[in-house]
Image: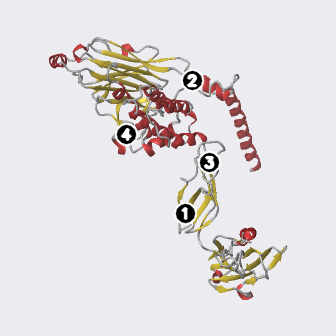
């Protein structure tokens, strides 16, 4: 019999517990061979197939408004009843308070509904409203809260916020309330699209007591751009000697379209990844090729985006410092020199013996070439205009160093050719320095040179009115040259650099970049640098500051380019329109005089 009752268990499980007892007796007894099944019912927590209250969350209503409340439950037996309670007290119809309790309705013999209609709401209806279900099996309840506010209460206006997490439309919100909006789902199949079930990501925004939007938080929401999501996913990936090379190559491919970066977080994520790759440079020599390429690609980013990334996270400074650490980490062991070529950055480093140093001149050349195809460049046989622009961008000239020994009579300007943009001159080592190194048998020292095509990775973000840029009046008009000498001095008191201007300007000033200025965000300082010669599109500077980034700053805003012939300054259409306007003016004057006589 116990087996025959098993089908009842799933149906009575919510409210009934079964206990089965078997009794064995001696043969010959009157109950011999029989079993006794005992069923006892124990009431547990009442579980209903359907029980809900609408609305289910706290409601903010203005005084004088109306609000219906509805409670629905499964009608499992005739003992089921629905009752309403307000702050623990039974609710009945009270017309003077605007409370009307509708009679419970039975729908299709399976659903029981009860409704309360609140009209002309006053502060008296504020508080907890509860729907209580009673039955022979037990009781259960659901509740919600009502907050009544005055119509004159301050509130934050409806607002629309668009950021790198998506488009958020905030509704009018009462002062002092924390508003929530669900995050927009990430595109299917993209990084970060999958979210654990049951976890709904939300953004929130607070309306302060004065009725102004205050703090907000969008951190739970995924980034709207797929590129930003991919970069963010890479920052969460552990990088070690095993996967560092693939990650570096992937980052080179992603930054090949850096000209399309619009989000400051994309620059910050790339910076974070470059720093992690730089730490592994001693274990993976191939990373020495990836890091300059990534930094060179980042110089394609729009200047304002780089400025924001520098201001927020010192992103540009950190990228430059990673590039300038390559020689320190890679020039070890039997390796006596390295040379890196990229579109916007050239790097050269080698070991020199002070006793044999007879002077050195290094010229930065720009050579036209067709770079390696990016993963996006040849996706179709017939590219459209955007793809053609990208193909043209890949054919930019690259920067490289060419160094050779010189004598003291050479000048850096004489080393500049049509295809060169900068020249750095190191005179021969002083006799005392050579004699000292020969006597002590000193180890070779390391000479490192880096050239940046422009100053985009050196933005001034603070108050620089007392610096070389004179409160951003001047900007970098030449390439930026970096020189670093480790292990010896060679008796050099200064470095001479000739730089070719990228654009015409006024009021030039020689300067070096100080990473410590403006709370660690850096700035251009004129101390220790001065202009020794200037002619045409070339300026020669002499700087006593070693291990610094050097450049020439100019005022590019006051330069006006007039055509050589003033007669060609205006288009013929301008003259024709001017004549017509003059005729209209004379007609108006004559008409005015005639009608006012």
Mark nearer the N terminus (4 vs 2)? 2
Q: Nearer the viewer, mark 4 or mark 1?
A: 1
What percent of the width, then of the height, locates residue 320? Answer: 41, 33
What percent of the width, then of the height, locates residue 103?
Answer: 79, 82
Dot label at residue 96:
none
Q: Identify which residue is drawn at 23% across, 21% down.
A: 443
**Which residue in the structure is indicated by mark 4?**
522
Single out the mark in the foreground, 4 or 3: 3
Residue found 32% across the figure and 34% down from its top = 526
Is residue 255 shown left or right of residue 439?
A: right
Marker disc for residue 394: 2
Residue 230's image quarter?
top right
Secondary structure under tag 1 reads strand
Residue wearing tag 3: 194
Q: Which residue was labeled with disc 1? A: 206
Tell me the quarter of the picture where residue 383 sits: top right
Position of residue 244 relative to residue 203, above or below, is above
Q: CA distance from mark 2 to mark 3?
A: 35 Å
* Cα distance between the residues tagged 4 and 1: 36 Å
Circle 2 packing at 10 Å, graded few (<14), some (14-19), many (20+), is: some
């Amino acid at each position: 019999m116990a087996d025959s009752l098993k089908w009842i268990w799933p149906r009575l499980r919510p409210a009934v517990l079964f206990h089965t007892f078997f009794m064995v007796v001696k043969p010959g007894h009157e109950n011999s061979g029989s079993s006794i099944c005992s069923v006892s019912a124990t009431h547990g927590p009442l579980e209903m197939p359907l029980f809900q209250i609408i609305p289910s969350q706290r409601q903010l209503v203005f005084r004088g408004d109306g609000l219906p409340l509805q409670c629905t439950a499964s009608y499992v037996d005739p003992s089921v009843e629905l009752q309403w309670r307000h702050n623990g007290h039974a609710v009945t119809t009270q017309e003077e308070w605007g409370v009307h309790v509708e009679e419970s309705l039975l729908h299709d013999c399976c659903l029981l509904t009860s409704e309360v209609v609140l009209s002309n709401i006053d502060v008296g209806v504020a508080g907890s409203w509860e729907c209580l279900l009673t039955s022979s099996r037990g009781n259960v309840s659901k509740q919600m809260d009502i907050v009544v506010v005055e119509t004159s209460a301050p509130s934050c206006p409806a607002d629309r916020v668009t950021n790198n997490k998506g488009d958020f439309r905030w509704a009018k919100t009462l002062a002092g309330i924390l508003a929530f909006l669900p995050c927009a789902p990430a595109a299917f199949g993209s990084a970060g699209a999958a979210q654990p079930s049951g976890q709904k990501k939300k953004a929130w925004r607070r309306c302060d007591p004065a009725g102004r939007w205050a703090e907000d938080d969008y951190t739970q929401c995924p980034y709207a751009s797929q590129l930003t999501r991919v970069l963010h996913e890479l920052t969460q990936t552990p990088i070690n000697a095993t996967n560092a090379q693939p990650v570096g190559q992937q980052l080179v491919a992603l930054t090949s379209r850096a000209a399309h970066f619009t989000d400051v977080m994309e620059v910050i994520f790339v910076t974070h990844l470059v720093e992690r790759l730089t730490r592994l440079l001693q274990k993976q020599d191939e990373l020495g090729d990836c890091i300059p390429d990534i930094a060179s690609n980042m110089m394609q980013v729009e200047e304002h985006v780089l400025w924001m990334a520098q201001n927020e996270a010192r992103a540009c400074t950190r990228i430059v410092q990673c590039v300038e650490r390559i020689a320190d980490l890679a020039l070890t062991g039997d390796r006596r020199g390295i040379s890196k070529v990229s579109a916007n950055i050239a790097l050269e480093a080698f070991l020199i013996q002070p006793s044999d140093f007879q002077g050195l001149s290094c010229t930065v050349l720009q050579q036209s070439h067709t770079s390696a195809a990016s993963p996006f460049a040849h996706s179709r046989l017939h590219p459209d205009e955007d793809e053609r622009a990208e193909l043209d961008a890949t054919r930019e000239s690259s920067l490289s160093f060419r160094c050779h020994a010189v004598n003291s009579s050479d000048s850096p300007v004489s080393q500049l050719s049509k295809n060169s943009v900068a020249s750095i001159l190191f005179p021969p080592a002083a006799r005392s320095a050579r004699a000292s190194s020969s006597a002590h048998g000193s180890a070779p020292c390391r000479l490192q040179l880096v050239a940046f095509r422009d100053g985009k990775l050196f933005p001034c973000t603070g108050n620089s009115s007392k610096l070389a840029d004179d409160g951003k009046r001047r900007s970098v008009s030449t390439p930026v040259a970096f020189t670093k000498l480790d292990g010896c001095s060679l008796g050099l008191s200064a470095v001479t650099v000739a730089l070719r201007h990228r654009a015409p300007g006024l009021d030039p000033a020689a300067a070096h970049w100080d990473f410590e200025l403006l709370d660690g965000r850096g700035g251009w300082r004129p101390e220790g640098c001065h202009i020794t010669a200037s002619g045409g599109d070339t300026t020669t500077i002499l700087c006593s500051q070693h291990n610094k980034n050097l450049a020439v700053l100019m005022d590019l805003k006051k330069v006006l380019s007039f055509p050589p012939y003033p007669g060609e300054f205006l288009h013929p259409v301008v003259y024709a329109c001017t004549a017509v306007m003059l005729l209209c003016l004379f007609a108006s004057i004559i008409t005015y005089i005639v009608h006012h006589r």
